[in-house]
Image (spheres, helix red, strand yellow):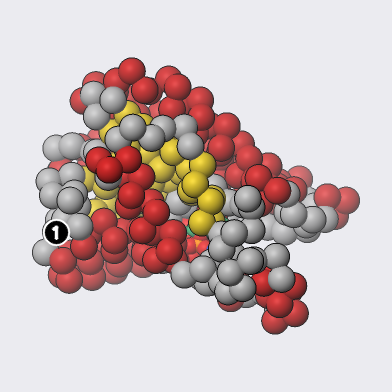
């Protein structure tokens, strides 16, 4: 499905990003992983290349640095010749109630989750517009749609990412580039494994399907939005959340 297409997945070393990279590699895409965990990015990329016989590259890239993003974009274009698919997945949490939230934790979360996606969209979007083809998917969160006590920074970053999605969709549409967001609910990854059991039980009460999602559940929806089956879909937010938000 994605033969000869090159996909960049930020935060693709592990978790949901890794599941997305695996899904795209299985469908024939060449895979580029940008992650601050350089060793894990290289390891994951090498593993996917061996398993699926596609070209892969793992690079240590901090998405909050415009210099790093611009340099990595140039390097990938030189090595792969094209960039067709971009998934902005890199994201973190630094939870606390507003009155106790440190300014630096607000800044860090907004910088990685929102500014990082802006910088990657700008650097790679520029090339996609010239090529008159591209598919971008931003990994938001249901928290950006419904809020969550203790996650002001995270909720604001993900709501902002949805605004960025709709704005870039409008700016890029006339050149054949689509931009959509996927908003996962509670997905089983290192991020949610760290939660206490009683917190997990409370969360599940909010999920009509009564179970956590798997990274693959998110990856298959991202794969759809990146594929030509979704070529007439842009500026949308697809929730993958067991029915939490409806
Ligand atoms: N797990 C969930 O339940 C859930 C729910 C909704 C949304 N999400 C979103 O999905 C995305 C992936 O989450 P996950 O659960 O797989 O988390 P994860 O921590 O397993 O993966 C996040 C990846 O991003 C990388 N990263 C962090 N800062 C970076 C930076 N500055 N530059 C480049 N890479 C960076 C990390 O090294 C890591 O590999 C995040 O955007 C998260 O907000 C997760």
Residue placed at 58% from the left, 74% from the top? 211
| Residue reaching furthest to the bottom | 197
| Residue reaching furthest to the right | 99
Of 46 and 138, nearer the camera is 138
Residue placed at 46% from the left, 32% from the top? 235
Measuring from the top left, give residue 221's x and y in whole percent: 39, 54
Side (left or right) of 156 relative to 116? right
Measuring from the top left, give residue 32's x and y in whole percent: 27, 52
Q: Does dot 1 land on a helix, a strand or a loop? A: loop
**For residue 229, which quarter of the picture?**
top left
* Residue 122 appearing in the image: yes
In the displayed structure, 123 sits above or below 44; it is above
Q: Which residue is mark 1?
A: 54
In the displayed structure, 39 sits above or below 88; it is below
Side (left or right) of 208 relative to 102? left
Q: Please give the count of numbered marks on the rendered protein.
A: 1
Measuring from the top left, give residue 66's x and y in whole percent: 44, 34
Crowd tier of the residue under label 1, counting other residues whose Cα lies within 10 Å: few below 14, some 14–19, many 20 or above:
many
Of 192 and 200, nearer the camera is 200
Of 107 and 140, nearer the camera is 140
Side (left or right) of 195 relative to 213? right
In the displayed structure, 23 sits above or below 200; it is above
């Amino acid at each position: 499905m994605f033969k000869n297409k090159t996909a960049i997945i930020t935060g693709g070393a592990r978790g949901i990003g890794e599941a997305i990279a695996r899904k795209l590699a299985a469908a024939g895409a060449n895979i580029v992983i940008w992650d601050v965990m350089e060793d894990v990015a290289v390891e994951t990329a090498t593993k996917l290349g061996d398993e699926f016989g596609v070209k892969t590259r793992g690079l240590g890239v901090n998405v909050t640095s415009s210099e790093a993003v611009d340099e990595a974009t140039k390097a990938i274009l030189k090595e792969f010749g094209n960039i067709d698919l971009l998934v902005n997945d890199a994201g973190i949490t630094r939870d606390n109630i507003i009155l106790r939230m440190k300014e630096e934790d607000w800044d860090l979360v907004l910088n990685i989750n929102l500014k990082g996606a802006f910088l990657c969209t700008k650097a790679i979007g520029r090339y996609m517009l010239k090529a008159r083809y591209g598919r971008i998917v931003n990994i938001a969160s249901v928290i950006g749609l419904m809020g969550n006590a203790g996650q002001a920074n995270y909720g604001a970053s993900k709501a902002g990412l949805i605004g960025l999605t709709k704005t870039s969709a409008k700016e890029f549409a006339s050149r054949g580039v689509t931009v959509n967001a996927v908003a996962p609910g509670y997905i089983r990854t290192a991020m949610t494994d760290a939660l206490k059991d009683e917190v997990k039980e409370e969360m599940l009460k909010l999920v009509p399907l009564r179970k956590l999602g798997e990274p693959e559940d998110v990856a298959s929806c991202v794969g759809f939005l990146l594929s030509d089956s979704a070529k007439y879909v842009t500026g949308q937010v697809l929730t993958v959340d067991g029915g939490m938000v409806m």
